[in-house]
Image: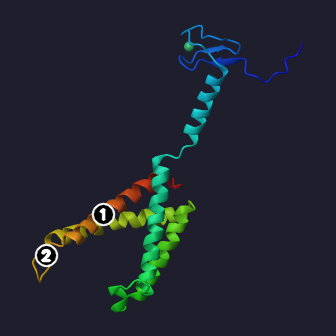
Amino acid sequence: MPRTSTAPRTIECPKCHQQLPAWAEQCQFCKTQLFPGQVRRVDVSTYADRNKPTWTEAAYIVVSVIIVAQGLFMLLQAFNVIPSVFYAIGGGTFFGIFGSIQLLLGVGMLLHQTWAQFIMKWVCVLNIPGGLLGIVQMAFIHNPLTGATNYVGLCVSVLQLCFTCFALFVINKEGDLD
Ligand SMILES: [Zn+2]
Protein backbone atom coordinates (compact mmCIF):
# COMPACT_ATOMS: atom_id res chain seq x y z
CA MET A 1 0.00 0.00 0.00
CA PRO A 2 1.52 3.43 -0.96
CA ARG A 3 2.46 5.74 1.87
CA THR A 4 0.12 8.75 1.81
CA SER A 5 0.96 10.24 5.17
CA THR A 6 3.11 13.40 5.18
CA ALA A 7 4.10 12.90 8.80
CA PRO A 8 7.89 12.85 9.30
CA ARG A 9 9.37 9.37 9.53
CA THR A 10 11.89 10.46 12.13
CA ILE A 11 11.80 12.89 15.03
CA GLU A 12 14.64 14.50 16.93
CA CYS A 13 15.18 13.75 20.60
CA PRO A 14 14.75 17.14 22.35
CA LYS A 15 17.50 16.23 24.82
CA CYS A 16 20.30 14.45 22.93
CA HIS A 17 19.21 15.44 19.35
CA GLN A 18 19.50 11.90 17.97
CA GLN A 19 17.17 11.01 15.11
CA LEU A 20 14.52 8.57 16.31
CA PRO A 21 11.65 6.74 14.60
CA ALA A 22 8.49 8.88 14.61
CA TRP A 23 6.63 6.25 16.64
CA ALA A 24 9.22 6.13 19.45
CA GLU A 25 7.84 6.76 22.91
CA GLN A 26 11.22 6.86 24.55
CA CYS A 27 14.64 7.95 23.26
CA GLN A 28 16.73 4.80 22.78
CA PHE A 29 19.94 6.78 23.44
CA CYS A 30 19.25 8.88 26.54
CA LYS A 31 15.98 7.24 27.71
CA THR A 32 14.06 10.56 27.64
CA GLN A 33 10.30 10.04 27.50
CA LEU A 34 8.91 11.59 24.28
CA PHE A 35 5.52 13.23 24.14
CA PRO A 36 4.07 14.72 20.96
CA GLY A 37 3.49 18.06 22.72
CA GLN A 38 7.11 18.22 23.79
CA VAL A 39 8.42 17.99 20.24
CA ARG A 40 5.99 20.68 19.04
CA ARG A 41 6.91 23.09 21.87
CA VAL A 42 10.59 22.92 20.89
CA ASP A 43 9.67 23.78 17.27
CA VAL A 44 7.62 26.82 18.30
CA SER A 45 10.39 28.21 20.50
CA THR A 46 13.07 27.91 17.80
CA TYR A 47 10.68 29.58 15.34
CA ALA A 48 10.11 32.48 17.75
CA ASP A 49 13.87 32.80 18.33
CA ARG A 50 14.54 33.05 14.62
CA ASN A 51 11.99 35.85 14.21
CA LYS A 52 12.99 37.84 17.27
CA PRO A 53 14.65 41.12 16.20
CA THR A 54 18.30 41.36 17.19
CA TRP A 55 19.42 44.24 19.42
CA THR A 56 21.21 45.88 16.48
CA GLU A 57 17.95 45.86 14.47
CA ALA A 58 16.23 47.58 17.38
CA ALA A 59 19.17 50.01 17.73
CA TYR A 60 18.94 50.83 14.01
CA ILE A 61 15.30 51.87 14.48
CA VAL A 62 16.14 53.90 17.62
CA VAL A 63 19.02 55.70 15.84
CA SER A 64 16.77 56.48 12.84
CA VAL A 65 14.01 57.82 15.09
CA ILE A 66 16.54 60.04 16.94
CA ILE A 67 17.77 61.43 13.58
CA VAL A 68 14.16 62.17 12.57
CA ALA A 69 13.51 63.82 15.96
CA GLN A 70 16.64 65.99 15.67
CA GLY A 71 15.56 67.08 12.17
CA LEU A 72 12.08 67.97 13.44
CA PHE A 73 13.60 69.84 16.39
CA MET A 74 15.79 71.90 14.02
CA LEU A 75 12.81 72.65 11.76
CA LEU A 76 10.72 73.80 14.73
CA GLN A 77 13.60 76.08 15.74
CA ALA A 78 13.96 77.34 12.17
CA PHE A 79 10.34 78.47 12.16
CA ASN A 80 10.70 79.73 15.73
CA VAL A 81 7.99 77.37 17.02
CA ILE A 82 10.65 76.53 19.60
CA PRO A 83 12.42 79.79 20.46
CA SER A 84 16.05 79.58 19.40
CA VAL A 85 19.02 81.89 19.53
CA PHE A 86 19.90 80.91 15.94
CA TYR A 87 16.59 82.27 14.68
CA ALA A 88 17.20 85.49 16.61
CA ILE A 89 20.57 86.06 14.91
CA GLY A 90 19.18 85.24 11.46
CA GLY A 91 20.14 81.57 11.16
CA GLY A 92 16.58 80.36 10.60
CA THR A 93 17.10 79.48 6.92
CA PHE A 94 20.28 77.56 7.70
CA PHE A 95 18.46 75.59 10.41
CA GLY A 96 15.52 75.00 8.08
CA ILE A 97 17.71 73.52 5.34
CA PHE A 98 19.71 71.34 7.73
CA GLY A 99 16.59 70.23 9.57
CA SER A 100 14.86 69.24 6.31
CA ILE A 101 17.90 67.26 5.12
CA GLN A 102 18.20 65.49 8.46
CA LEU A 103 14.47 64.69 8.54
CA LEU A 104 14.70 63.24 5.01
CA LEU A 105 17.76 61.14 5.93
CA GLY A 106 16.09 59.83 9.09
CA VAL A 107 12.95 58.78 7.19
CA GLY A 108 15.14 57.21 4.47
CA MET A 109 16.99 55.26 7.19
CA LEU A 110 13.70 54.01 8.65
CA LEU A 111 12.71 52.79 5.17
CA HIS A 112 16.12 51.06 4.80
CA GLN A 113 17.06 53.22 1.82
CA THR A 114 20.71 52.66 0.87
CA TRP A 115 21.23 56.32 -0.21
CA ALA A 116 20.17 57.51 3.27
CA GLN A 117 22.43 54.93 4.96
CA PHE A 118 25.34 55.88 2.68
CA ILE A 119 24.99 59.63 3.40
CA MET A 120 24.45 59.12 7.15
CA LYS A 121 27.49 56.85 7.32
CA TRP A 122 29.71 59.56 5.84
CA VAL A 123 28.07 62.32 7.88
CA CYS A 124 29.00 60.28 10.98
CA VAL A 125 32.58 59.69 9.79
CA LEU A 126 33.05 63.40 9.05
CA ASN A 127 31.46 64.39 12.37
CA ILE A 128 33.92 62.44 14.52
CA PRO A 129 36.93 64.86 14.23
CA GLY A 130 34.61 67.85 14.79
CA GLY A 131 33.04 66.11 17.79
CA LEU A 132 36.46 65.43 19.34
CA LEU A 133 37.47 69.06 18.75
CA GLY A 134 34.23 70.20 20.42
CA ILE A 135 35.00 68.13 23.53
CA VAL A 136 38.54 69.55 23.74
CA GLN A 137 37.17 73.08 23.37
CA MET A 138 34.54 72.53 26.05
CA ALA A 139 37.10 70.99 28.40
CA PHE A 140 39.88 73.57 28.02
CA ILE A 141 38.30 76.79 26.84
CA HIS A 142 36.49 78.15 29.84
CA ASN A 143 33.79 80.74 30.03
CA PRO A 144 35.66 84.08 29.63
CA LEU A 145 33.34 85.82 32.09
CA THR A 146 33.25 83.33 34.96
CA GLY A 147 36.31 81.17 34.17
CA ALA A 148 34.19 78.09 34.82
CA THR A 149 34.14 74.90 32.78
CA ASN A 150 30.94 74.48 30.77
CA TYR A 151 30.02 71.06 32.16
CA VAL A 152 26.63 70.97 30.41
CA GLY A 153 28.29 71.75 27.08
CA LEU A 154 30.97 69.14 27.79
CA CYS A 155 28.38 66.45 28.56
CA VAL A 156 26.38 67.32 25.44
CA SER A 157 29.55 67.14 23.29
CA VAL A 158 30.54 63.76 24.75
CA LEU A 159 27.00 62.38 24.27
CA GLN A 160 26.91 63.66 20.68
CA LEU A 161 30.19 61.95 19.87
CA CYS A 162 29.00 58.71 21.50
CA PHE A 163 25.80 58.86 19.46
CA THR A 164 27.75 59.52 16.24
CA CYS A 165 30.02 56.50 16.83
CA PHE A 166 27.06 54.33 17.85
CA ALA A 167 25.09 55.38 14.74
CA LEU A 168 28.10 54.54 12.57
CA PHE A 169 28.38 51.09 14.18
CA VAL A 170 24.65 50.40 13.78
CA ILE A 171 24.58 51.53 10.12
CA ASN A 172 27.56 49.28 9.36
CA LYS A 173 25.88 46.37 11.14
CA GLU A 174 22.28 46.73 9.97
CA GLY A 175 22.65 48.86 6.85
CA ASP A 176 22.26 47.38 3.39
CA LEU A 177 25.58 48.84 2.19
CA ASP A 178 28.21 46.43 0.94
ZN1 LIG B 1 17.78 11.30 23.54
Q: Which quadrant is the N terminus positioned in?
A: top right
Q: Residues within 10 Å of mark 1 (few under 14, many from 20)?
A: some
- Mark 1: amino acid: Leu
Q: Name the residue that disc number 2 marks.
A: 142
Compare residues 126 and 46 and report the one nearer the observer: 46
Mark 2 crowdedness (10 Å alpha carbons): few <14, some 14-19, many ≥20: some
Residue 92 spot, x, y in % from top left = 41, 88
Instruction: Give the spatial CA distance, label 2 vs label 1.
Output: 19 Å
The reply to whether the residue tagged 1 has its Cβ within 8 angstroms of ligand 1 is no
Q: In the image, what residue type sits under mark 2?
A: His
Q: Position of residue 30 (x, y in %)?
A: 54, 10
Residue ID at (61%, 29%): 41
Tell me which residue sits at (57%, 62%) in the image.
111
Which of the 4 quarters of the picture holds residue 6? top right
Residue at point 12%, 82% (across, down):
144
Count of numbered tags: 2
